[in-house]
Amino acid sequence: MLLKVSLLLFIGLAEFLIEAKSLPCSQVQKDHGIVCRCNATYCDTIEPLGTVTAGKAVVYTTSRKGKRMERSELKHSTSSSGSTTSQSGIKDERITKT
């Protein structure tokens, strides 16, 4: 009985992990650029946000060249000359790709 319950939990967890991943865009070239094709059996999905650690940001990028909700992480850092504060109180800081 315990084996059955463990197996069911494992299968349920495996299905959850599979669903948590993104499905890529099925790209189709049109006159104005690339579009994603969705139909009754398939449609792309966006990779889940997940946990974002302190000092980082997650960006989803789409471009005319074919990127479709491509996930990347950015790391927050101050400029090499140090932070400066503008009149609005916003610090002059840079975000770099990791």
Image (cartoon, rainbow, N blue to C red):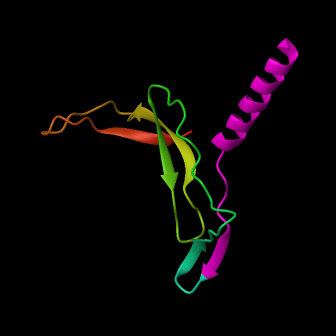
Quadrant of the rendering where the C terminus is positioned:
top right
Quadrant of the rendering where the N terminus is positioned:
top right
Residue at screen point 53% across, 71% down: 64
Residue 25's place in the image compared with 85, above or below, is below
In the image, farthest residue toward the left: 87
Coordinates of residue 88 in the picture (x, y in percent): 14, 39
Coordinates of residue 90 in the picture (x, y in percent): 22, 37
- In which quarter of the view is residue 91 placed? top left
Residue 31's place in the image compared with 43, above or below, is below
Residue at screen point 83% across, 12% down: 2
The answer to if 72 sits in the magenta stretch is no
Asked whether 22 or 6 is in front, the reply is: 6
Residue at screen point 68% across, 36% down: 16
In the image, farthest residue toward the bottom: 31
Asked whether 6 or 36 is in front, the reply is: 6
Coordinates of residue 57 in the picture (x, y in percent): 45, 38
Asked whether 52 or 38 is in front, the reply is: 38
The answer to if 14 sits in the magenta stretch is yes
In the image, farthest residue toward the top: 2
Give the magenta part as a residue range. 1-29
Q: Dominant secondary structure of the magenta stretch? A: helix
